[in-house]
Structure formats: C-alpha cells, structure tokens
Amino acid sequence: MTSSDERLFRIFPQSHSVLDSHHQGVAAVPGLVHGEPAWMGSWQFRANRYAVENARSHTRMHLTLANVNVDVEAAARIGGVLMANAVTHSRVPEYAQIPMQWVLLQTGELLIQVQDSRRDFPGFDEAVTWEPAEGKKPRGLWIARELGAELAFAPTEAGKIVQALIKPLEVPAWDSPAVSDTP
C-alpha cells in the first residue's frame, strides 16, 4: 500500500490529436509502466450496451492508424474486456461517460486503461488469476491475461484506473542476407 504522500500514478501529458476530442492527461501505474510515451489517444464511451463493441472498434481504429507493433485484434479484445469490466462493476447510469486511453511507449509496449467511478476493486487478485473450469466459458480479466496483458489497477480521487500492458510483437531476426550470392 502506498502512503498518502506517495504518488499512485505517473501522469503523461495528453497532447492534442485529430482523433481526440479530450485533452486530459494519461495516468500510469508506476509498477506496471517503464518508459515514456511515443503516442497517445483517448475517447469516452457511454456506459450502455454498445460500450464494449465501441471500445473494441475504437481500439482497433486508433491502433491501426497509429501503426503500432502489437496484435491489434488481441488489443481490441483486451480493450473490450476492460470496458466490460468498467460498465458492469462501476454501477453508473447508461448516460455516464467512461474514459479509455491508449498509450504507446517508446519501448513498443502498449498501455490501455479504462477509468471508472468505483474506487475499489474487490477481488482483483482473484479476478486476474481466475481460471475457467473444464467446459466453462472464459470470461473477464482472464481473457485479457490469456491474450498477453499484464493487469494492474489503482484508485484515483474520482474512482480507479484499470490498466493492461501489452508487449510488442517480436520482429523476426534476419540471420541470412536479403540477396543470396549463390544461384
């Protein structure tokens, strides 16, 4: 646990983007993120039945336009899981806005975070380590973890932030020259 004078987050200043309609900073849980941002994007979603699909679609769009070196489809599913978690457990009305941010670090890692108004996260460790029994449908944060995300959360003054850190795709090493000298 952190003391009251310790910072829970590192704040990355949000720069304006053509796709962004919001100018807020992006917070990062220090134990999860190492490095500085190379690109950031954000959006807000209404907490209604379309929030999860909208989060997946926007994640796919933002990451494709940013040309990131991560599995975009896996990242879109992870973003959807984080949004589903926020909509389901924050207990806000359907007209409420739930912010989502994407931060590409200079290391190539991608941070996806969702903020909601509920400050606590009861059973976070159990939710992250839960395994579906044989024949049971995978659900929740387990899906994000299976897709390769490292998960963390931290309380804020306005609620909490749940984050997923996604490693970049590995680029294959070129052991042989591009052009062979032998016929």
Image (spheres, rainbow, N blue to C red):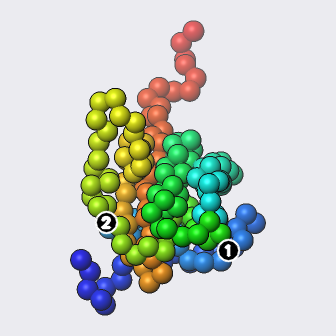
Q: Is residue 36 visible?
A: no
Question: Can you say whether 161 is above or below 130 in the image?
Answer: below
- Residue 25: quarter of image: bottom right
* Quadrant (top left, top right, bottom left, bottom right) of the N terminus: bottom left
Question: How would you rate the neighbour count of disc 2 (Cα within 10 Å): few for under 14, some for 14-19, many for 20 or more?
Answer: few
Q: Is residue 127 visible?
A: yes
Is residue 7 or residue 161 the one in the foreground? 161
* Quadrant (top left, top right, bottom left, bottom right) of the C terminus: top right
- Image point (73%, 63%), residue name: 19
Q: Does residue 26 appear left or right of residue 65 in this picture?
A: left
Q: Does residue 2 appear left or right of residue 88 in this picture?
A: left
Q: Secondary structure at mark 2?
A: loop
Count up the numbered dots.
2
Q: Disc 1 vs disc 2: which is toward the camera?
A: 2
* Amino acid bearing label 2: Pro
- Residue 131: quarter of image: top left
- Image point (37%, 46%), residue name: 142
Question: Can you say whether 114 is above or below 66 in the image?
Answer: below
On the image, the x and y values in percent for residue 71 come to 53, 42
- Image point (45%, 77%), residue name: 159
- Residue situated furthest right in the rendering: 18
On the image, the x and y values in percent for residue 32 come to 36, 64
Q: Which residue is labeled 1 in the image?
A: 22
- Image point (27%, 58%), residue name: 125
- Residue situated furthest bottom in the rendering: 5
Question: Can you say whether 143 is above or below 108 in the image?
Answer: above
- Residue situated furthest top in the rendering: 183
- CA distance for labels 1 and 2: 30 Å
The mark found on residue 122 in the picture is: 2
Q: Secondary structure at mark 1?
A: loop
* Amino acid bearing label 1: His
